[in-house]
Image (spheres, rainbow, N blue to C red):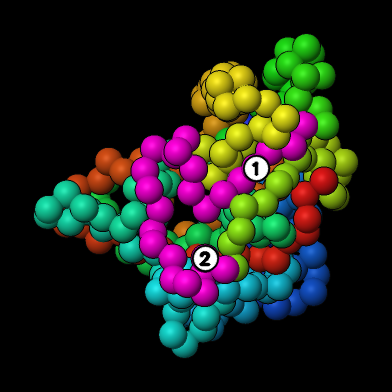
Amino acid sequence: MKVVPLDAPLGARIEGICWEDATKPDVAQALNKALGEHLLVVVPGQPMTAPLMRDFAAAFGKPRAQLLRYKRNGEVPEVSTMVSTLMADGTTDKTALRSEDWHTDDSYMAVPAKATLLHNMETPSRGGRTWFCNMHTVYEALPESTRKRIDGKRAMHAYDTPRARNRPSTRTVQEIAETPDVEHPLVRTHPDTGRKALYLNFNRLDRILGMERAESDELLDELAAEARKPAHHFGHAWTVGDCVVWDNRATMHRVDVDYPMGERRIMQRVLIEGDKPF
């Protein structure tokens, strides 16, 4: 196994392994070390079956099923199928539309996912790049006065918020009951390194607690402006079979919905159980 750092603010490419190797303790340990150091790893290979992807994902922790039942694979519920093909009428899966803006997975849960694995099954002839943002460097780039202002602040995250560009998929009664609004720190400390990261989600973060809406929106827009700077970003151009794993505790991501209409774009996704932000 070889870890090749990317020429970017985050990320590394993993070479020299096959999917089954991840079940070996030494390989799993090396994969986790690479993820911890680089926040994101790209592992090329061939398309995986759902059971194989679940087993590969287990190298990074315990896989768990995502909220929306309709996306779960019937054979392996820990694996979800993400279809973002652009349809002839201009519509596409709503999750894909929301993915156009920067977000981190599961922040509307009390215990968000530690990591996400996204595996490319079919990809359009062009476009559809996924971008990742290093939230450690975003926090560290803020003026000292801003860092002092936000340290210790808490924010409300919700399944939907008026700040989001697009509306999310409709939830069932059971799914609504499982996702009450939750509070998280605005600045999150990584449990493995102790390093601080700005914990934002443009689709789910509703407001900063203790502030009026206008003041909260103004500050969130200021923080978002830093996160949008390309100096913090890496864009992954997909090849069929790629599996990208990222640390949700210190990254955001978004997708370019700029691929040709009608060309299939299908991913498999696994979430890894995390810990309560602090």
Picture quadrant where residue 137 is located: top right
* Residues at marks 2 and 1 touching, judged by CB atoms closer than 8 Å: no
Query: Of the numbered discs in the image, which one, if any, rests on residue 156?
Result: 1
| Frontmost residue, 59 versus 161 | 161
Name the main secondary structure of what is drawn in magenta.
loop
Looking at the image, residue 199 lies above or below residue 85: above
Residue at image x 40%, y 53%?
168
Residue 194: percent from left, percent from top: 87, 41
Q: Considering the image in quadrants, where does the N terminus appear?
A: bottom right
The amino acid sitting under disc 1 is Met
Q: Is residue 105 magenta?
A: no
Question: How busy is the neighbourhood of tag 2: few (under 14 within 10 Å), some, or many (20 plus)?
Answer: few
Q: Secondary structure at mark 2?
A: helix
The amino acid sitting under disc 2 is Ile
Q: Which residue is mark 2?
A: 176
Query: Of the numbered discs in the image, which one, if any, rests on residue 196?
Result: none
Q: On the rendered structure, is 244 left or right of 23?
A: left
Give the Cα separation between the discs numbered 2 and 1. Answer: 16 Å
Residue at image x 85%, y 50%?
192
Whether residue 130 is visible, yes or no, is no
Whether residue 105 is visible, yes or no, is yes
Question: How busy is the neighbourhood of tag 1: few (under 14 within 10 Å), some, or many (20 plus)?
Answer: some
Residue at image x 69%, y 42%?
250
Picture quadrant where residue 115 is located: bottom right
| Frontmost residue, 194 versus 55 | 194
Q: Secondary structure at mark 1?
A: strand
- Earlier along the polypeptide chain: callout 2 or callout 1? 1
Residue 75: percent from left, percent from top: 47, 87
Please provide the residue range marked out in magenta.
153-177
Q: On the rendered structure, is 234 left or right of 169?
A: right
